[in-house]
Image (cartoon, rainbow, N blue to C red):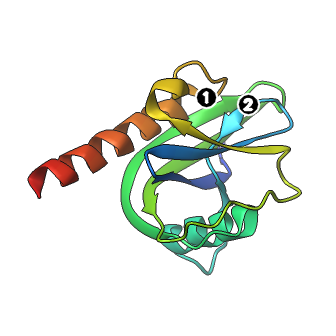
Amino acid sequence: MPEPVYPVSIKGVLVRDGRVMLLRNERDEWELPGGRIEPSETPEECVAREIAEETGLRVDVKTILDSWIYYIPIADKNVFIVTYGCTTDSDQAPVLSHEHNRVGEFAEHEVQALTMPEGYRSSIFTWFEHMRSLHAAR
């Protein structure tokens, strides 16, 4: 039996001014910006490129947060997801691309109520906690 092959999607958790940026997809789920990695790029290059394409924002990719297999029932497929914590110096508003139908920025306490894969939620909370510990160490 052949080994399973999964598409790889690299996602970024971008928090600025205490709010995480999320995009709503065609399944009416909130998701992290990001997408498929190209053979010629690193995961960090991929997430920076994808965030720029999907929102117009330039980011600094900081650290890997998590990885997991996500089953998308409506598409009947598994995707290997990797998430990275990201920062930006930009204060410009994100620009919505054709890939999504809405962009939103949410406070940490609002994330629990949003419709999204649990792995994204976990990565968001991990990045908020990491950022808090960095500020506490200063």
Q: Nearer the viewer, mark 1 or mark 2?
A: 2
Inspect this view and state whether residue 10 appears: yes
- In the picture, the quarter occupied by the C terminus is bottom left
Do the residues bearing badges 1 and 2 touch, measured as CB atoms within 8 Å? yes
The image position of residue 69, as x and y in percent, is 56, 37
Label 2, secondary structure: give it: loop
Q: Which residue is more in the foreground, 26 or 43?
A: 26
Kindly give the residue lying farthest to the top in the view shown.
Answer: 113
Which label belongs to residue 29? 2
Q: Residue at x 69, y 60 (%)?
A: 94
Q: In the rendered image, which residue does mark 1 sit on?
A: 117
The image position of residue 126, as x and y in percent, is 35, 39
- Classify residue 56 as left or right of residue 132: right
Q: Which residue is more in the foreground, 119 or 39?
A: 119
The amino acid sitting under disc 2 is Glu
- In the picture, the quarter occupied by the N terminus is top right
Distance in Å between CA atoms under marks 1 and 2: 8 Å
- Classify residue 71 as left or right of residue 100: left
Quadrant assignment, res 66: top left
Q: Residue at x 57, y 70 (%)?
A: 48
